[in-house]
C-alpha cells in the first residue's frame, strides 16, 4: 500500500509537506499541491481514513439519509446532491431508513463513527432522542421534511400551497366531491398537504363540502396504498367526481388502479397527481399534476451545505428555503358538468343494452 512516505521519497520532500499538501493546507503553495496530487494519483495513493479520524480530521464524506430510494422523487434528490458535492470535493454516501426510526438511528451512529463532514437528512416521523443528539453534534441540514427537535436549517417545498392549488383547480371546475389520498399526518409533509386540501374546501358552503369519507391517509411511499384507497373511494354509493394524490408513489398507485378498472379519465373522474414523473405526460389524456422543483431544490441545498461546512457555519444561524410548486395543466381534469353528462350517458347506454 502506497504511503505518504513513499510519495515524499519520490518527490524528495518531507512527509509533512506531502501530508499538508494532500490536506489542502494554506501553508503549501498551489504548485506543490498540484505536484503532490499528481504523483499521489499516479502511485495509487488512498488516504487512511482511520488515521485521519484519530487526528480528529473530518472525512470528505457527506451522509444522505433518505426514507426510500425506490421513490424516484428521492432518487432525483440523491443524484442531484451527489453531483453537487462531488464538484466541491466531497463524496455522498447514501443511507435508506424506510421511515424506521431505529434504522435511522443505526445509520446516524455509523455516519458519526466515520466522522463524516456533515449529514443531509429527510427525517422519520419521530426521530429517536439519540438520533437528534447525534445530529446536533455535527453539521446537518433537513431536506423535504422538517422536525423542530432536530434544528432550524431546512430546505423544502410549500406542501400546503401545492395541494391547495390542486384542490382549488378542481373546485373552479365545479367539483365538490373531491377526494384526497395522501400520507399520514404524523409526517410533517403529510400534515401540511392535508391542510392544503382542507384550506381549499373551507370557503365552500357546508352542504357542498367533502366529508371525511373522501379522505384516505396512509404510507406515502406505497403504490399499493394508492391502489387500495382509490378502489375504496370509487366503491362508495356517492363516489367522488375528482381526486387529488398527495405523493408520487400514491399517484402511481392511483393511475395503475384506474387503468386496471378502465375508468375513463376525465370523463368519469378528474385526477390531479403529485410530481411529474416520466410517463405522466402521456398517461391517458396526460396527467394534470403538481410539478416539483426537486432537482433545483436538492442542488441549492447541496451548494449551501458545502459552503456552510467549509466556513464552519453549519450549526450556527437558522436558515430556511421554501420552494414553490407549479400546477401543470393537462387533460386529466374537466368541468363537473361534463363528468355528470358522461355518467348519465353511460347509465343510459347500460339500460338500453339491458
Image (cartoon, rainbow, N blue to C red):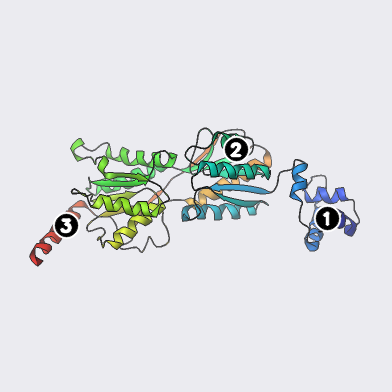
Q: Residue at x 63, y 45 (%)?
A: 110
Q: Position of residue 156 (x, y in %)?
A: 48, 43
> Which quarter shows the N terminus?
bottom right
Q: Position of residue 58 (x, y in %)?
A: 71, 44
User: Is the residue 174 above or below the residue 35 in the image?
Assistant: above
Q: Residue at x 76, y 46 (%)?
A: 52
Residue 264: mark: none
Q: Position of residue 168 (x, y in %)?
A: 29, 45
N-term mark: 3 or 2: 2
| Secondary structure category for the residue under label 1 | loop
State the residue lying farthest toward the bottom. 353
Task: Answer left or right for 242 relative to 292.
Answer: left
Local packing at callout 2 (Cα closer than 10 Å; few below 14, some 14-19, many 20+) is many
| Secondary structure category for the residue under label 2 | helix
User: Can residue 16 be seen in the rendering of this structure?
Assistant: yes
Local packing at callout 3 (Cα closer than 10 Å; few below 14, some 14-19, many 20+) is some
Local packing at callout 1 (Cα closer than 10 Å; few below 14, some 14-19, many 20+) is some
- The residue that mark 3 highlights is 343
User: Is the residue 68 above or below the residue 263 in the image?
Assistant: above
- The residue that mark 2 highlights is 135
User: Is the residue 75 above or below the residue 189 in the image?
Assistant: below
> Which quarter shows the C terminus?
bottom left
Q: How many marks?
A: 3
Task: Answer left or right for 232 relative to 7.
Answer: left
Q: Residue at x 35, y 44 (%)?
A: 217
Instruction: Examine the image and state in which quarter residue 316 appears.
Output: top right
Spatial CA span between label 3 and label 2: 55 Å
8 and 230: which one is in front? 230
Instruction: Examine the image and state in which quarter residue 27 appears.
Output: top right
Q: Position of residue 315 (x, y in %)?
A: 62, 35
| Secondary structure category for the residue under label 3 | helix
- The residue that mark 1 highlights is 3
Amino acid at each position: 500500500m502506497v504511503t505518504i512516505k513513499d510519495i515524499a521519497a519520490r518527490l524528495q520532500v518531507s512527509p509533512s509537506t506531502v501530508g499538508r499538501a494532500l490536506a489542502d493546507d494554506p501553508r503549501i503553495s498551489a504548485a506543490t499541491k498540484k505536484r503532490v496530487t499528481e504523483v499521489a494519483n499516479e502511485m495509487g495513493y488512498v488516504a487512511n481514513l482511520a488515521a485521519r479520524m484519530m487526528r480528529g480530521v473530518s472525512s470528505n464524506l457527506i451522509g444522505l439519509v433518505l426514507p426510500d430510494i425506490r421513490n424516484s422523487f428521492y432518487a432525483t434528490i440523491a443524484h442531484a446532491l451527489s453531483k453537487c458535492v462531488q464538484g466541491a470535493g466531497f463524496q455522498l454516501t447514501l443511507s435508506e431508513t424506510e421511515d424506521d426510526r431505529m434504522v435511522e438511528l443505526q445509520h446516524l451512529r455509523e455516519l458519526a463513527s466515520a466522522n463524516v463532514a456533515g449529514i443531509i437528512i429527510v427525517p422519520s416521523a419521530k426521530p429517536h432522542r439519540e438520533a437528534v443528539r447525534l445530529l446536533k453534534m455535527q453539521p446537518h441540514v433537513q431536506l423535504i421534511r422538517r422536525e423542530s427537535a432536530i434544528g432550524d436549517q431546512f430546505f423544502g417545498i410549500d406542501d400546503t400551497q401545492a395541494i391547495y392549488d390542486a384542490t382549488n383547480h378542481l373546485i373552479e371546475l365545479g367539483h365538490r366531491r373531491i377526494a384526497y389520498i395522501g400520507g399520514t399526518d404524523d409526517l410533517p409533509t403529510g400534515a401540511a398537504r392535508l391542510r392544503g386540501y382542507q384550506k381549499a374546501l373551507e370557503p365552500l358552503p357546508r352542504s357542498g363540502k367533502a366529508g371525511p369519507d373522501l379522505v384516505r391517509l396512509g404510507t406515502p411511499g406505497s403504490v399499493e396504498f394508492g391502489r387500495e384507497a382509490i378502489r375504496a373511494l370509487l366503491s362508495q354509493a356517492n363516489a367522488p367526481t375528482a381526486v387529488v394524490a398527495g405523493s408520487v408513489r400514491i399517484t402511481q398507485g392511483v393511475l395503475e388502479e384506474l387503468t386496471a378498472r378502465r375508468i375513463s379519465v376525465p370523463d368519469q373522474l378528474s385526477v390531479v397527481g403529485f410530481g411529474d414523473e416520466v410517463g405522466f405526460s402521456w398517461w391517458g389524456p396526460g396527467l394534470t399534476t403538481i410539478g416539483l422543483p426537486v432537482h433545483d431544490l436538492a442542488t441549492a441545498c447541496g451548494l449551501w451545505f458545502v459552503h456552510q461546512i467549509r466556513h464552519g457555519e453549519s450549526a450556527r444561524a437558522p436558515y430556511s428555503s421554501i420552494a414553490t410548486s407549479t400546477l401543470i395543466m393537462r387533460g386529466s381534469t374537466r368541468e363537473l358538468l361534463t363528468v355528470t353528462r358522461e355518467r348519465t350517458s353511460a347509465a343510459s347506454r347500460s339500460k338500453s343494452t339491458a
